[in-house]
Image (tube, rainbow, N blue to C red):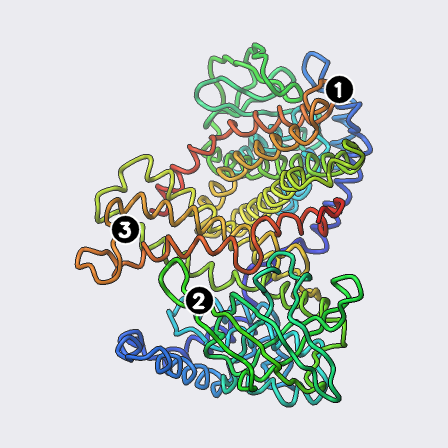
């Protein structure tokens, strides 16, 4: 038994850390988030060239065919860097196509999606809150693969990942890969949020070591230390829950669905708590636009409600285990 | 990442299950409850530990040269979980097995290892820890129990408190002050003290549950041979901290299973009371389920790290904070489900599960105090894990 990343998984995580922090420094994230779609096509191509856009697509269709634990480890780093744009939505939609579509569709659409030449996103039945639809070529909506759709912006809290209302007349029958893909997507969202929590913790600890009041670093005050300790407990717990959900899905364990809901219900609350503490420990600086914590805090709130909030997932746990 | 047990771990688990199936009396609780005296009950548990030892199941992760099994910490965790799962009797020598023994293996002399370790495993000698004092709790290094050198003995005077198993113990891992002229952490020494020595007085301490789980220890001119110093004189802080980190890192494995079984029981009760359709109850139970799972996963991650060649470090405080605060939240949820029945105690004919829920509720308040308060655990995380300035 070994609950931790294998050497290969750790290598992937390291190269994700290296790539995302080099290509998506926070100044670049801020620049991209000010554009109308929060998407930079040339950076997307660079990301695709490294294979990150094809992680959930099998090798036979030009993807990386990575295991879910490895993908989660990489997405933790994407979340830490606050990578803007359609990466998460694209991974979920392509996972749904790979899981549900027939061979003809897979051969036709997946290679271009794996190469990042095309972008996919997904929608639930409400046709609302669709991530990055304006830059997507395909929408996976329930069992349908849609190429003809309209996208109307829904200005919302997370400026790095835009939401849209979509409309469409019909699409190609895809099959029922969406539930599995949503479980994968929920897990990858948890991984992203965990990375964001780690970044908020690191930023806060660095700040309270240097910011002085009463002649000493504010991090020397026990109330501030307790804020940081609680962020650490939450972040490590989020990581444990995320890796287990990824592992359970990857291995097809019978408890996979409850593991996903355990992770999402916990992290929905824990990411918010971590953000609350990060802002509080920064004092007035934490409330400013220029401080990067607010960007992660916005992402955390959007993530909390996406794919079911904590109460939704607790009810799912109740259905599965009570 | 691979959560499957290896073939060796599986063989270990199956061997243990088979042994438990053969050697453990499933109806032991009734036998135990029928014994009138606390001392007699303790002897019953000691006999059980002897059986475990004879079966080769004591000291799983101890090196085989000291009578252990020489297995990894993963097998140790499997052992603790399987024993809890089977509802096996407690091992009364738990402090020796989990804390004093490993500390002696790290710091003890060859003679000390030879003298003490096997008797810890067999339960022939029971150990307690003399750490906390009335004026040295979280600030353990401020302790004042004094040891003065007199030839080849130390003369010990002072008082300890919150000593689990003190009344039953044959030996005590005692932290004393051997130098009061130096900074407080640098003048401490750990002594291995025979509890039958003249001048050792043990008094039970009645706690809010009504039980006497803990004791006060009084030492009056107690003579302890210099040969019983564990580690070096005035290096007792390092020795004691090693014990405390073992405590924080490993205490949770059995507790996780106990809370999980308790959770399954309260779900049954909620069902029989017709409360499982109440959305509020469902939310709260699901929250407990999620947190119990995360407690298990956090522990698995920590043990895997230790199995890869680490001794328990300050991050063990994460486990301590998580399980203790979770158990308090869980006991409150259980009380809400039980309603007025939750307050009934042992002896009431209307009490559910013979009043164990009112006991568990009260007992859980101790969880965030014993083995280091939640407050001190947070400061340990702040200082030793996150590198924040020391604040105390």
Q: Is disc 1 on the same chain as disc 3?
A: no
Can residue B391 be seen by looking at this rendering?
Answer: yes
Q: Secondary structure at mark 2?
A: strand
Q: Which residue is mark 3?
A: B343
State the CA–CA distance, disc 2 to disc 1.
57 Å
Between residues B34 and B226, which one lies in front from this camera angle?
B226
The local crowd at label 2, few if under 14, some if 14 to 19, many if 20 or more residues have their Cα within 10 Å, is: some
Is residue B343 shown left or right of residue A67? left
Is residue B18 shown left or right of residue A134? left
Q: Which residue is mark 1?
A: A290
Q: Which residue is mark 2?
A: B205
Can residue A108 be seen by looking at this rendering?
Answer: no
Name the residue rendered at 52%, 38% in the picture: A99
Percent coordinates x, y for residue B73 in the rendering: 60, 69
The chain to which mark 3 is attached is B
Which quadrant of the figure has residue B349?
A: bottom left
Is residue A279 shown left or right of residue A250? right
Q: Relative to A106, does residue B163 appear above or below in the rendering?
A: below
């Amino acid at each position: 038994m070994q609950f931790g990343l294998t050497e290969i998984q750790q290598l992937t995580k390291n190269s994700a850390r290296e790539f995302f922090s080099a290509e998506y420094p926070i100044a670049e994230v801020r620049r991209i988030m000010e554009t109308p779609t929060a998407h930079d096509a040339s950076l997307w191509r660079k990301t695709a060239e490294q294979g990150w856009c094809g992680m959930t697509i099998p090798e036979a269709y030009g993807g990386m065919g990575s295991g879910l634990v490895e993908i989660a480890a990489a997405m933790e780093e994407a979340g830490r860097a606050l990578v803007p744009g359609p990466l998460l939505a694209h991974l979920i939609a392509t996972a749904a196509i790979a899981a549900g579509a027939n061979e003809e569709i897979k051969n036709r659409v997946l290679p271009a999606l794996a190469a990042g030449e095309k972008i996919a996103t997904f929608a639930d039945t409400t046709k609302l809150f669709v991530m990055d639809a304006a830059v997507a070529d395909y929408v996976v909506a329930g069992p349908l693969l849609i190429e003809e759709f309209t996208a109307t912006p829904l200005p919302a809290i997370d400026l790095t990942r835009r939401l849209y209302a979509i409309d469409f007349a019909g699409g190609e029958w895809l099959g029922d890969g969406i539930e599995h893909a949503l479980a994968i997507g929920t897990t990858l969202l948890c991984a992203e949020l965990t990375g964001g929590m780690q970044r908020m913790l690191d930023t806060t600890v660095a700040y309270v070591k240097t910011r002085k009041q009463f002649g000493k670093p504010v991090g020397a005050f026990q109330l501030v230390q307790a804020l940081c300790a609680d962020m650490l407990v939450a972040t490590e717990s989020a990581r444990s829950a995320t890796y287990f959900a990824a592992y359970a899905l990857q291995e097809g364990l019978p408890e996979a669905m409850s593991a996903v809901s355990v992770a999402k219900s916990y992290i929905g609350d824990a990411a918010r708590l971590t953000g609350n503490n990060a802002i509080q420990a920064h004092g007035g600086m934490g409330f400013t636009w220029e401080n990067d914590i607010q960007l992660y805090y916005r992402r955390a709130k959007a993530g909390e409600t996406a794919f079911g909030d904590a109460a939704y997932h607790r009810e799912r746990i109740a259905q599965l285990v009570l | 990442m691979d959560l499957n047990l290896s073939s060796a771990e599986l063989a270990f688990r199956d061997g243990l299950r088979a042994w438990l199936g053969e050697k453990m009396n499933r109806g032991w609780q009734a036998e135990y409850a029928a014994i009138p005296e606390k001392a007699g009950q303790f002897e019953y548990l000691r006999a059980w530990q002897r059986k475990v030892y004879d079966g080769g199941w004591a000291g799983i992760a101890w090196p085989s040269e000291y009578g252990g099994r020489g297995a990894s910490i993963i097998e140790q965790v499997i052992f603790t979980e399987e024993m809890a799962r089977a509802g096996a009797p407690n091992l009364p020598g738990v402090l020796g097995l989990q804390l004093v023994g490993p500390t002696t293996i790290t710091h003890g002399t060859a003679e000390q290892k030879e003298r003490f370790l096997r008797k810890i495993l067999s339960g022939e000698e029971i150990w307690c820890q003399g750490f906390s004092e009335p004026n040295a709790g979280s600030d353990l290094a401020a302790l004042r129990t004094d040891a003065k050198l007199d030839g080849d003995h130390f003369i010990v005077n002072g008082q300890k408190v919150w000593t689990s198993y003190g009344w039953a113990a044959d030996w005590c891992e005692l932290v004393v002050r051997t130098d009061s002229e130096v900074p407080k952490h640098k003048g401490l020494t750990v002594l291995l003290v025979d509890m039958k020595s003249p001048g050792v007085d043990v008094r039970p301490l009645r706690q809010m549950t009504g039980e006497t789980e803990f004791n006060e220890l009084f030492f009056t001119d107690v003579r302890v041979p210099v040969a019983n110093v564990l580690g070096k004189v005035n290096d007792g802080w390092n020795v004691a901290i090693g014990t405390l980190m073992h405590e924080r890192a490993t205490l949770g494995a059995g507790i996780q299973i106990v809370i999980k079984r308790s959770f399954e029981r309260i779900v049954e009760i909620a069902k029989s009371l017709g409360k499982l359709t109440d959305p509020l109850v469902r939310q709260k139970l699901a929250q407990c389920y999620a947190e119990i799972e995360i407690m298990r996963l956090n522990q698995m991650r920590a043990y895997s790290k230790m199995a890869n060649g680490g001794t328990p470090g300050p991050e063990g405080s994460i486990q301590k904070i998580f399980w203790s605060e979770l158990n308090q939240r869980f006991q409150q949820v259980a009380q809400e489900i039980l309603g007025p029945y939750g307050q009934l105690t042992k002896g009431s004919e209307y009490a559910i599960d013979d009043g164990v829920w009112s006991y568990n509720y009260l007992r859980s308040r101790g969880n965030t105090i014993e083995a280091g308060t939640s407050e001190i655990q947070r400061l340990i995380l702040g200082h030793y894990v996150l590198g924040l300035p020391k604040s105390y």
